[in-house]
Image (cartoon, rainbow, N blue to C red):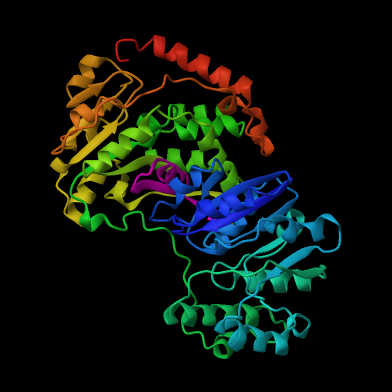
Amino acid sequence: MISIVIPVLNEGATIRQVIKTIKKTSRQIEIIVVDDNSTDNTVAEAMKEDVRVITSSQRGKGISMREGMMAAKGDIIAYVDGDITTYPDNIVDILTIPIEKDEADFVKSYFERQAGRVTQLVAKPLLSILFPDLAHFQQPLSGMIAARKSLLTKVQFENDYGVDIGLLIDIHLMGARITEANIGRLENAMQTWEQLSKMSREVSRTILKKAENIPSENLETLGNINVIREQMEYSILESIEKMEKMVIFNLDHAVFTQDYLYWAAIAFDEEAAYLQIQATVEDPIEKLEKITALFEHRNLAELLEVADAIPIIPGIEGVVKELKRRGYVCGLVTDAYGCVARHIKNKLGMDFVFSNKIQLVNSVATGRFTAGEYFMKEQAYDKSQLLTYISKEYGIATQNIIYVGDGKQDEQLLIKAGIGVAFCPQYQRAAVEKIADKIITGLSLQPLLDIVPDVTPVKKGIKIPPIRINQQQAKRIGIGSLVGIGAATLLYFAVKQMTKRKKETAAC
């Protein structure tokens, strides 16, 4: 099988056309769109084409490319850009046939367009001096490439404009067979001078860094680099200054039908250890540290596949869409990790995330965690501090915040919010009524639309399908130790939850 990986950032206008072109191949393929935390409708548009969409752990094309490679199931991986609508219909064949025929290990595309200024003025001159064997490549900065996954796992993905030239150099230094492939005439948007200046610095830095005959202490001088680009995480509150009305959903108790950390522990054969931690550790920080340690060496693709396997509350996408029509910004809060929460945020069309952070190095978990600053109060972990933080930092009055969560886990948040909504609360209704303004007892969030104020006419009749776990959700996740979370595990978990809920009939 061939995996097609498309790293994207704010390419909602073009991504569907790119996917449709790729699907014209007769080969067996999978398409993985890796969203670089877009702020437009890229994710929604990609999902219309029934392809797999994952969210990168932090911004940067190189990280998106590497994490797409990690998620890929195919032996051969081809990368294409998501902003080009003039690919030939046989783009997949052009990039991959030389590898399938064992004529090449790595295919670098070129196309019928004058090479860009950075290529002509920076990349080619440096290559001719430092890597003369690569100087003949017509467009060494082209991002449309293909290689065997086994080869890509051995190279470094630079996380800036240097990623494409860096891969070419690394694979050349490994002694692999590299060939060029003509993919026709392409058209895409011209870059600004500011972008070209940045691209020039980063491409030259990468080439110089890869050159073994250049002393490392002189790289900054030779590259005319003043500041090495900092790795940048997605700003979860990018437009919060404009927010006036906010709805915050507890990811684990109002979006997922199961707690993410517990589900992940089961998926990774750590359920017993997880339950032991829950039973014996009182301090929230220590508890989260020990739980996170259970996930050491798990990569981002595995963490996201666990999230994708958890059924979500039916119809929530429609509820979120209607809330946003009414002028509310919608987001998630969770004790789990930002990389997971942002992935779900993008799938549901939400706006922001409040979460903790799992430390990733090369997209692999180190087993360490960092608490979100908005959950901390005088060195103590207190999730209810979130509303105080929002009010202080961004001037959003708590009376304009609606919180949807669990009556037991989220007591203080329900009390402090302007409207606290207990969703299918996990303990007796009489106790919930003392802290929540409203209670929703069924497995549907549609009643939230009757609670949330609206100054415009509300569209009626959002259809909520019955909740069920289908075959696709029940199948095995299929990465390493995730094999154990097959249908048998889901059945076990479902039975376990049914037993638990029988004891809580007063609540739900």
Measured as percent of width and height from the top left, residue 120 is found at: 61, 86
Measured as percent of width and height from the top left, residue 327 is found at: 21, 45
Position above or below: 356 against 405? below
Question: Looking at the image, which is closer to me, 465 or 14?
Answer: 14
Question: Looking at the image, which is closer to me, 325 or 134?
Answer: 325
As drawn, which residue projects farthest toward the right? 102
Question: Looking at the image, which is closer to me, 405 or 327?
Answer: 327
Quarter residue 451 falls in: top left
Question: In the figure, is residue 296 to the left or right of 103?
Answer: left
Q: Residue at x 43, y 78 (%)?
A: 192
Quarter residue 323 falls in: top left
Measured as percent of width and height from the top left, residue 11 is found at: 46, 58
Question: In the figure, is residue 169 to the left or right of 425?
Answer: right
Q: Write the start and end of the magenta stretch as one range.
A: 338-361
Q: Residue at x 72, y 78 (%)?
A: 137
Quarter residue 125 falls in: bottom right
Measured as percent of width and height from the top left, residue 448 is found at: 25, 29
Q: Quadrant of the N terminus?
A: top right
Q: Residue at x 70, y 82 (%)?
A: 211
Question: In the figure, is residue 180 to the left or right of 191?
Answer: right
Q: Quadrant of the C terminus?
A: top left
Position above or below: 406 against 207? above
